Image (cartoon, rainbow, N blue to C red):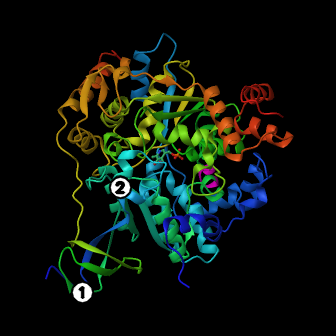
Amino acid sequence: MAKDMSFEAVMARNGEIMKNAVGIDYDLFESGSIAFDYERMMRETGYDLQEIEEIQRETGVGDTPIYELRNLTKLARKFAPAGKGARIFIKDEAANPSGSFKARRAATACYHAKKLGYKGVIAATSGNYGAAVASQAAMRGLKSIIVQECYDSKGKGQPEIVEKARKCEAYGAEVVQLSVGPELFYTFLVLLEETGYFNASLYTPFGIAGVETLGYELSMQFREREGRDPDVVVVTNAGGGNLTGTARGLIKAGATDTEIIGASVSLQGLHMASDSQFNKKSFTTGHTGFGIPFATWPDRSDVPRSAARPLRYIDRYVTINQGSVFYMTEVLAQIEGLERGPAGNTSLAAAFKLAQELDEDKIIVVQETEYTGAGKHIQPQLTFAKENGIKVIIGDPTEEVPGENIILPKDPSYIKVEEIELDRTRRSYIRNCIKNTKVEKVTKEDLEFLIEDTKSNEEFVKKVLDEFGVAY
Amino acid sequence: MDARKGDWVRIHNIVLEAGERAPNIPEDTQNVPLELWDKGFLLNEGANIGDKVEVETYIGRKMEGTLIEVNPYYEHDFGKCVPELMYIGRQVRSLLEKDGE
Ligand SMILES: Cc1ncc(COP(=O)(O)O)c(C=O)c1O
């Protein structure tokens, strides 16, 4: 009998398809309630840091250089109070094969897929990760399929995503492109079932453990060149894997005093699944449209339990407007001689402002860059924005309305960050845990899990549970 | 005949019709179909744009769809001049020069 390939039938086979496609039995880590054993999942299905370093070395991943951005630091100090203006550094992750830190995530996933005997890998991604998977798969002799959300219903594609498709094809991948909508997941499942390939999800322990080397390297590099760990690491945050992996790597290096600040581009007001708004945004990652939903419910991803859990590690979360990131991308090229980004420069733009709060002898690190190229560059992205009716204005970024305009700061003093009140994010996460597991009473284990998963404390979690009328 | 067997082509499919979309998505998205594009080597002896065809994708999967393009190529580029960006480099360079160092 032929399998039922209808939308409902395929979606109903999700659990079974995923089990075959990631080779992990997630049930092993479940408590049956809210809690699951995160560390056990990371330990038993992943590789230790040394193994991952070796795996990544085999395919030229990692060991990326650090540059001190002396001119940018000087510029920041001009707008900082006397004695303020931390030294700004950047880790040039664009130096990885395929041009971003995502190579670290793909390296372990592809190694693991090869080891388990899969013939190919599939990833659902419109971003750098596709190129990373295609590149690592090429090195490991695996076939690859990348599934992208690329076009609106008029067939217009974000230039940045089109460029990603090109790059994936350059590495021999098949690129399946879709119009806007979360039902991409259905096509993804159909492909997994048909091919029997490995799901190189961004959110497995392999992927996240692959980023740990970034945090670890950071600490080692700074101890070597400056004799100490960085004071602040700023991370461009979307699905949370970049932040989670980096923070875990820093902790493994013993850099427990380093403050982890997440930064996302504010796309407030734009709906990510809306066909008509799809091309109104000028960022396809690093934005709040992913950052907030994934922080408040990480298990929305394509695996049952996400290894990317940003609230576990984040100390502070700020947003910045699109125009400031574009401005900073131009500044990076003009005074530091580095043409990178733009999306990856979200943390750079935030760091420029954050450095002004810190003493001059402090060290603030922008932990990644990404490659730039046709389509993936401020000019084509702003050209595209204008074609979609977005006004490009030079003025006060606080007046930017995502989907209507992009405001480039009049001068560097106009670059500001906005705080996300993390306690509210934590509260939403706890609410989602309750809603999605439908528990009436949280267990002792749940309570401990929630404290850890929100990096908060017993008092806070209990207060939130009281508020929602949930017993513990 | 627009394409011959073995030509590199682009095909198009409708995955879900407008009425079949997931219920929890915005209305504007529900009102349009979920479309799919892929590329491969044409397996039919010959075909014209708009024909239903079968292709073998680059990694060797077989797939059917409507032929929409032969020898597809990328048109993305470095965009047009964005005059609004022109002040930035000069501005920050002159701020640094004023340093007196
Ligand atoms: C260059 C770059 N920076 C940051 C991110 C955000 O990473 P994450 O989704 O793990 O938060 C991405 C991923 O989309 C990226 O490609």
Q: Using the image, name the chain to which the residue with label 2 belongs.
A: A
Figure check: B88 above or below A183: above
The answer to whether residue A198 shows anywhere in this view is yes
Q: Using the image, name the chain to which the residue with label 1 belongs.
A: B
Q: Position of residue A248 (x, y in %)?
A: 67, 44
Q: Quadrant of residue B47?
A: bottom left
Q: Position of residue A297 (x, y in %)?
A: 61, 43
Residue type at mark 1 is Lys
Which residue is located at x 72 percent, y 26 percent?
Answer: A467
Secondary structure under the numbered disc 1 in the rendered image: loop
Q: Can you say which quadrant of the picture contains the C terminus of chain A? A: top right
Residue type at mark 2 is Cys
A469 relative to A92 in the view: left or right: right
Disc 2 with disc 1 on a shared chain: no
Q: Are marks 2 and 1 in contact (CB under 8 Å)?
A: no
A266 relative to B87 in the view: left or right: right
Q: Quadrant of residue A14?
A: bottom right
Q: Which mark is residue A347?
A: none
Figure check: B71 above or below A325: below
Which residue is located at x 45 percent, y 14 percent?
Answer: A80
Which residue is located at x 20 percent, y 86 percent?
Answer: B46
Is residue A303 magenta-colored?
Answer: no
Residue placed furthest toward the bottom: B45
Residue placed furthest toward the right: A444
Q: Is mark 1 within 8 Å of ligand 1?
A: no
Depth check: give the residue in front, A150 or A414: A150
Gap in angstroms between the C-alphas marked 2 and 1: 28 Å
The answer to whether residue A259 shows anywhere in this view is no
Q: Which mark is residue A150?
A: 2
Which residue bears the numbered disc 1?
B5
Q: Give the residues in magenta.
A: A209-213
Depth check: give the residue in front, A160 or A467: A467
